Amino acid sequence: MQDHTRIRDLPALVGQTATIRGWVMTTRSSGKIGFVVLRDGTGYLQVVASKADLPEPAWEAVRSLTQETSVSVTGTVRADARSPGGVELSMASIEVIGPSVDFPITPKEHGTTYLFEHRHLWLRSRRQVAIMRIRHEVEQGIRDFFYTNGFACVDSPILTAAIGESAGGGLFETEYFDLGKAYLAQTGQLYVEAAAAALGKVYCFGPTFRAEKSKTRRHLAEFWMVEPEVAWYDSNDNMRLQESFVAYLVERCLERRQEELKELERDTKPLENVRPPFPRISYTDAIAKLQSLGNPIQWGQDLGGDEETILASQFDRPVFVFNYPREVKAFYMKRNPADPRTVLNNDCLAPEGFGEIIGGSQREDDYDLLKQRIEEEKLPLDSYGWYLDLRKYGTFVHSGFGLGLERTVGWICGTPHVREAIAFPRQMHRLRP
Ligand code: 4AD
Ligand code: MG
């Protein structure tokens, strides 16, 4: 299997002979010339087969190729300005490796349900490949950004005792040996708070789980979240970190993934605006703004998807909404000393209707206030003992945030629904494939 070339490496081999292994996307042929488009994951290649130059069995093989047949093709690499990558291959021989009869996904339109039932095959299509490549770029960007900025990666557990964003309907549970129930992590935050007291600047990055019965285009039951946590950062420092991080990820995709963005027909103009500083608006001002635009929302209510879209459309780049009422936010957020009805937090809303991509806050560092909030929320105090310890032994100002990977990738790709931004989405009604 050594002796073959990936499509992306072909341009350096013009004039030479190369072997490509891949899958057939489309074929067309006149009586004498056949065109086969191949893909191998690294790119797309037009192969030209000429009846006159091929032995009869090879020509017959070309004529009977079907969509998604896997093949090995050997030929001469030729420069061709109109081809993707600037080259095509003149076929000298072909070997059919695995036939493919009646591939379920054809170039015609399929319904979304059908496509997701065939997600394992749908992933091979150009659009899905482009989205996965951009996701891959964003993941690598996340790692590089934090590594370069002196953050240590600390992986948080997925199996936890009852601890997380909230109790109630949002937890997936499973039996855990003799210890009763374990819950799939809704967040790694509480653990990276402990790690921040050990290492200063840390992050975790992994799958998180929410059992909420939401069927919106922004919710998955399993999604990936990156959660930095920084000792001695207040809420303002936290927002500054967020804007430089988000701008870095977007710029990186613009620099390295133009081809994929083009494949997705993404208008990149709005992405080019994503530069710090991001506008900031307090929750209280946001409510006034929404009311002035005719929205019936009242102070004290959480912003829903519609409100987020209206607010974000007032700006040409992501916007921070800060200091929400404490009733609508998680128990661990620090009470705002200037207005105790609110907490020192922020959401970051992406433009173009994509809504919240980040939730972050300064954390409550006062032992008594935190304990009081845990009790108010009727959370199991025994599970939170270790978390309270962080305020008992050398408490410290600290802040952090969580950026949702699928929402961010969905926004960068311009895909309206987060389920396309992950290879195998988990939703209320979807556990297969
Ligand atoms: O706002 P959330 O719930 O915040 C936290 O979990 C904090 N513990 C983060 C922290 O401060 N360390 O979630 C953070 C982000 C959201 O802004 C959104 O991008 C994403 O995670 N998210 C979801 N993405 C897809 N499906 C869901 N059900 C999501 N819930 C949250
Ligand atoms: Mg949130």
Image (cartoon, helix red, strand yellow):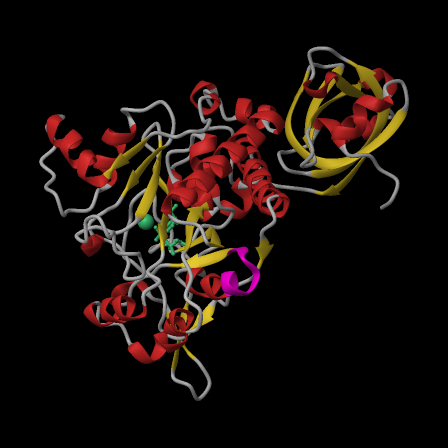
Along the viewing direction, whichever of 28 and 84 lies nearer the viewer: 84
Task: List the single residue furthest toward the bottom.
Answer: 178
Indicate whether 175 appears above or below 11.
Answer: below
Q: Is residue 114 visible?
A: no
Give how far across and how far down residue 430 sits, in percent. Answer: 39, 54
Give how far across and how far down residue 160 sits, in percent. Answer: 43, 72
Along the viewing direction, whichever of 73 and 230 lies nearer the viewer: 230
Kindly identify the residue that appears in the image at 32 percent across and 44 percent down.
Answer: 346
Indicate whether 360 appears above or below 292.
Answer: below
Q: Horizontally, is 421 left or right of 134 in the view?
A: left
The question of residue 307 being in magenta is answered with no
Give how far across and how far down residue 152 sits, in percent. Answer: 60, 55
Number of marks in the rendered image: 0
Task: List the single residue furthest toward the right.
Answer: 16
Along the viewing direction, whichever of 333 and 414 lies nearer the viewer: 333
The question of residue 200 being in magenta is answered with yes
Q: Is residue 159 visible?
A: yes
Q: Horizontally, is 300 left or right of 86 in the view?
A: left
Q: Quadrant of residue 319?
A: top left
Magenta region, residue range? 195-205
Q: Horizontally, is 33 left or right of 184 in the view?
A: right
Kindly identify the residue that appears in the image at 37 percent across and 53 percent down.
Answer: 427
Q: Horizontally, is 57 left or right of 378 in the view?
A: right
Q: Quadrant of residue 116?
A: top left
Indicate whether 285 appears above or below 36.
Answer: below
Give how far across and how far down residue 114 sits, in percent. Answer: 41, 43
